[in-house]
């Protein structure tokens, strides 16, 4: 694999260290968001983590100390200047699209025109470009407080057979968790689909590679770092047969299913014309209406479809910035959640969002959903839950997404200093309303992955962002130039 990623130097926490143990106490945080309907007072005195197991072992109440006293822990980190949340979880992204951010020919187009202009550019993707794009996207996510990311990679032009393998390596290098979906496109222009022929693959190749990736990389159980899912791209880019066969293989191998659905009215019209069905009817016809599926966007479901999705236990990745950027519409997120659908947040591709920042997405979700439902039903705590426990549910994870004893120690720590927060009074609303942009510290499985606002790798070395940006910019220029 080619590499353009370097790490340099080391970072340290502001901690008192006893080298004989593996426990760490994040002491007296400014505020804690533990998770849905959980009283934050349980952890006002802090959170105790076992770094060896990577799990949370104790929540300390206000004024308290860990069981056995402060001397019983190996490290004490003063968290009094930090708001702590569960690590944010991104349920929908296209890492490779960091290479085509803010490209003028598509800056003002809706989805279908945006795609038809970008497909020929993306068809020139190379292994080196993908590695750099993945590193940029994941580092940006980490620095925004994100600890787990789902990527939907569906482009496998000539020379890109190992695309998911490349992403696995980057995930391990940065020390994040990832749900890497083996996407696909099999319905090209000549057969009535949207993608150009050079971007589609035969179904047999897709299914064989999907099986290979699960057998090679998919981890199961609590603490899994890398998981694999299957993700035929969309109704307008894959055949009905591939959708059905992917569902059968996913059930056999017990992995999750992901696709774009009901993103735009154009897609709705495509499904009506090609299949004679609305999107959820089509989903059911190919065996996807189940709790194994999570769906990107879900903007244009009607009330009956929302009920059916909830009854099936399906999940939706709400992507507010992308939906606004492409003028796709406003997802009915509150109604979906009230019907029993897991609602998570996704940044979507960094060419329809132009950023990979999940804490920013929380604020966007708050505002766009308040336009539909009002302020009282869309609270700051509720949108934080979409980015944490809701997203965890969408990815089928019970070990992440909230701060509880026994769960993975995936945490984001935000400072509320600087002009943007001056005059703010309540930390959790301030985190969302005042527009936090970056986390100060981020922990995955009890290990620091961001310190002082800078991503560090699993080796403990700080990411050389200047070198990364220079290499990434060069690949982006070459890709667009042709």
Image (spheres, rainbow, N blue to C red):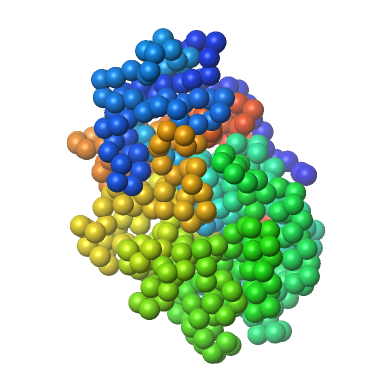
Give the image location of residue 195, x and y in percent: 65, 75
Quadrant, the N terminus: top right
Q: Of 338 and 239, which appears nearest the observer?
A: 338
Q: Could you tell me which residue is drawn at 50 percent across and 10 percent down? A: 18
User: Is residue 30 shown above or below 273?
Assistant: above
For this rendering, which residue is in front, 126 or 361?
Answer: 361
Q: Is residue 180 above or below residue 57?
A: below
Work out whether residue 340 can be spotted: yes
* Nearer to me, 475 or 421: 421
What residue is at 32 percent from the left and 30 percent from the top?
A: 43
Quadrant (top left, top right, bottom left, bottom right) of the C terminus: bottom right
User: Where is residue 5 drawn, in percent x and y?
Assistant: 67, 38
Name which residue lies at 59% across and 47% down: 178
Residue 424 in the image: x percent, y percent? Answer: 21, 37
Q: Is residue 144 left or right of residue 101?
A: left
Q: For residue 449, what is the image quadrant?
A: top right
Residue drawn 32% across the image and 35% down it: 32
| Camera-side residue of 207 and 6 | 207
Q: Can residue 260 be seen in this view?
A: no
**Quadrant in which residue 338 is drawn:** bottom left
Residue 276 lies in what quarter of the image?
A: bottom right
Q: In this view, does 264 lie above or below 50?
A: below
Q: How many marks?
A: 0
- Lateral position of residue 371 relative to residue 247, left or right: left
């Amino acid at each position: 694999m080619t590499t353009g990623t370097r790490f340099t130097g080391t970072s340290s926490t502001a901690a008192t260290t006893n080298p004989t143990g593996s426990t760490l106490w994040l002491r007296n945080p400014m505020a804690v968001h533990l998770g849905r309907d959980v009283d934050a007072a349980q952890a006002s005195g802090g959170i105790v983590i076992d770094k060896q197991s990577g799990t949370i072992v104790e929540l300390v109440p206000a004024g308290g100390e860990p069981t056995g006293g402060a001397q019983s822990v190996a490290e004490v980190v003063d968290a009094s200047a930090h708001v702590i949340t569960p690590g944010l979880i991104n349920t929908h992204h296209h890492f490779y699209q960091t290479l085509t951010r803010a490209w003028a020919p598509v800056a003002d187009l809706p989805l279908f025109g945006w795609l038809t202009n970008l497909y020929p550019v993306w068809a020139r993707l190379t292994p080196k470009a993908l590695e750099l794009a993945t590193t940029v996207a994941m580092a940006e996510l980490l620095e925004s407080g994100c600890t787990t990311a789902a990527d939907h990679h569906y482009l496998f032009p000539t020379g890109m057979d190992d695309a998911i393998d490349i992403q696995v390596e980057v995930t391990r290098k940065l020390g994040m968790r990832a749900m890497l979906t083996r996407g696909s496109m099999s319905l090209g222009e000549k057969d009535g689909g949207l993608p150009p022929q050079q971007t589609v693959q035969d179904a047999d190749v897709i299914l064989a590679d999907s099986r290979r990736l699960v057998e090679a990389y998919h981890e199961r159980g609590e603490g899994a770092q890398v998981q694999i899912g299957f993700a035929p791209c969309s109704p307008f880019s894959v055949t009905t047969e591939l959708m059905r066969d992917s569902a059968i293989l996913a059930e056999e191998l017990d992995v999750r299913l992901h696709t774009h659905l009901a993103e735009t009215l154009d897609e709705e019209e495509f499904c009506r014309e090609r299949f004679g069905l609305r999107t959820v009817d089509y989903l059911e016809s190919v065996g996807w209406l189940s709790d194994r599926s999570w769906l990107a966007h879900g903007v244009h479901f009607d009330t009956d479809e929302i009920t059916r999705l909830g009854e099936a236990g399906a999940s939706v990745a709400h992507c507010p910035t992308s939906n606004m950027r492409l003028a796709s519409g406003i997802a009915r997120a509150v109604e979906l959640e009230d019907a029993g659908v897991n609602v998570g947040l996704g940044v979507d591709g960094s060419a329809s969002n132009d950023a990979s920042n999940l804490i920013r997405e929380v604020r966007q979700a708050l505002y766009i959903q308040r336009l539909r439902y009002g302020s009282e039903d869309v609270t700051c705590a509720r949108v934080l839950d979409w980015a944490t426990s809701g997203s965890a549910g969408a990815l089928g994870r019970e070990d992440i997404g909230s701060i509880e004893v026994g769960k993975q120690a995936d945490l984001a720590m935000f400072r509320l200093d600087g002009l943007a927060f001056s005059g703010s009074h309540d930390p959790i609303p301030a985190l969302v309303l005042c527009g936090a942009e970056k986390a100060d510290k981020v922990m995955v499985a009890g290990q620091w992955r961001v310190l002082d606002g800078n991503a560090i790798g699993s080796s403990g070395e700080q990411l050389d962002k200047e070198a990364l940006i220079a290499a990434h910019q060069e690949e982006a220029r070459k890709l667009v130039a042709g």
